[in-house]
Amino acid sequence: MSATKFIFFFLLFSIKIFSQADTQLVNNAPKNILLKLGKNALLQGDPNSAITFFEAFLKKDPKNAQAFYLAGQAYRQTRYYEKAQKYFLTSYRIDKKKSIDALYFHSLALKSSGKY
């Protein structure tokens, strides 16, 4: 029984250490790398990882319309429609000319969340 507890706590501790290291790597990565990683995660069908990269990017560059748009797409794919609405609208407000598609996806997110 004590061996089982030891293994359990060892695994739990190991997971905690690795997750902290991953968080530090993401937070210390250059913003252009974070944007590329987010785009690649979306292309590979991993919106949860994409969200992590886009959120870290937006902490470093909070006025980037493209990153808000892409984060909105990732949130939409994970069915976090309220967050998707917010990110699409923010993208549009930052750059109305380049983010015109954001209004369309904003309305889709509104409809999906039942707020139309």
Image (spheres, helix red, strand yellow):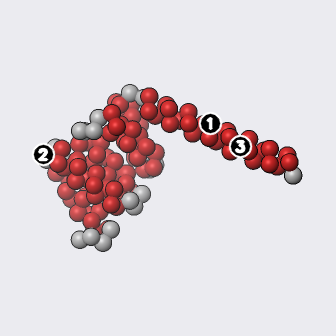
Location of mark 2 (residue)? 97
Mark 1 vs 3, N-terminal side: 3
Query: Is there CB contact under 8 Å for labels 2 and 3?
Result: no
34 on left or right of 105: right
Which badge, 2 or 3, is on the more N-terminal residue?
Answer: 3
Residue under numbered circle 3? 11
Q: Which amino acid type is marked by label 3?
A: Leu
Q: Is residue 97 above or below residue 80?
A: above
| Secondary element type, mark 3 | helix
Labels 2 and 1: the sequence-earlier one: 1
Residue 43, quarter of picture: top left
Q: Nearer the viewer, residue 70 or 57?
A: 57
Tell me the kind of residue under disc 1: Ile
Residue 41 seen anywhere in this rendered image of the structure: no
Q: Is residue 110 above or below residue 14?
A: below
* Label 1: how many Cα within 10 Å (few below 14, some 14–19, many 20+): few
Where is residue 115 shown, x and y percent of the image? Answer: 27, 70
Query: Regarding mark 1 in the picture, which secondary structure is present there?
Result: helix
The residue identified by callout 1 is 17
How crowded pointer 3 is (Cα within 10 Å; few <14, some 14-19, many 20+) is rated as few
Question: How far is disc 1 from disc 3 in space, using C-alphas?
Answer: 10 Å
